[in-house]
Image (tube, rainbow, N blue to C red):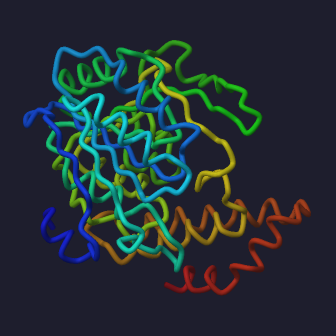
Amino acid sequence: MNLEEFKLKYQKQPVIEYSNSVTETPLVSVCVQTYQHVKYIERCLKGILMQKTSFPFEILLGEDASTDGTRKICLEYAKKYPDKIKLFLHHRENNIKINGKPSGRFNFGFNLFNSKGKYIALCEGDDYWTDPLKLQKQVGFLESNNNIVICGTQTKKLNKENVLEEIFNTSFIEKNEVFYSRKDVLKKNPFDTCSVVFKNGQFPKELFLNYNAPDWILYLFLLKKGMGCILKDITAVYNYHGNGIASTLTHITYLQYRLHDRMLLMKNSKLIDKNIIKKAGIILIWNYIKQAIRWRKEFIIALYSNRKLIIKFILN
């Protein structure tokens, strides 16, 4: 699927595009998806614009029809930085629903299909970068290691109390980078979205439009072509403010979403072996059962609420 086919299938109202005077030959496309981020989007954009690189990069800024003032800030920045920012103003009529609920898939897909860089970097509008050499370090690493298809870094978490948390990864005690295979990522996603840079053109961009965790699906597909790596450097902050998708998931919806994604994966035999996916799903269910045995009420409720889906998954 290309951009025109994507628009033909999903676009009901034409996206308003401000292409500005951004370079036609960027090495990196930075994809920013934002919705209701009036408190955060300026900090996000400043973290990207401060990047010091020896190569050109573009910022693809997708604004998903916010009503809180986010759009106004995006327009101001697109006008102020016409050589860096391409702005896409979306309509809610184009929204792609997942499990009957609105999602940011059209926004994300539109950015990906418009990306021209050899590499793609991601940063949601409520997250931000802290290291001005982030892109330089990661692109340099990818350029020097052709077997690496995705490069992340360590991050800090900004919790609901607006306090930064640094989670020490013991893997970096004697190493400057840690490598991950597709099998590793299937068990647990080690990459924070705001930290990743990956190779463009290595995956069908429409593949993950129906998944609850599109970044995880993207990484699994990329890792068919090589290895993943996380650098020791802390370069970004993931904002766990309580309004994002991940931070609002209950144990019920988390289990539902993960089983839903694994069932979709099992239908896509080109991506990964069905038995491997099923084993990972069983491990997920078993972890919930172990918590339920300890009489943790929220896990008991999650298992009961998803009992039909669990049976369907096991029998699939």
Position of 94 with respect to 5 (left or right) is right
Position of 21 with respect to 228 (left or right) is left
Residue 48 percent location from the top left of the image: 37, 27
Q: Give 263 or 238, whichever is nearer the viewer.
A: 238
Q: Quadrant of the N terminus?
A: bottom left
Q: Residue at x 46, y 16 (%)?
A: 175
Residue 254 vs 308, above or below: the answer is: above
Residue 173 percent location from the top left of the image: 56, 14
Residue 86 percent location from the top left of the image: 24, 42
Picture quadrant where residue 161 is located? top right
List the single residue furthest toward the right. 295
Q: Residue at x 51, y 12 (%)?
A: 174
Q: Residue at x 52, y 80 (%)?
A: 100
Q: Give 252 or 83, whichever is nearer the viewer.
A: 83
Picture quadrant where residue 272 is located? bottom left
Residue 309 vs 299, above or below: the answer is: below
**How many numbered discs, if any?**
0
Residue 238 vs 309, above or below: the answer is: above
Residue 271 percent location from the top left of the image: 30, 64
Position of 139 with respect to 216 (left or right) is left
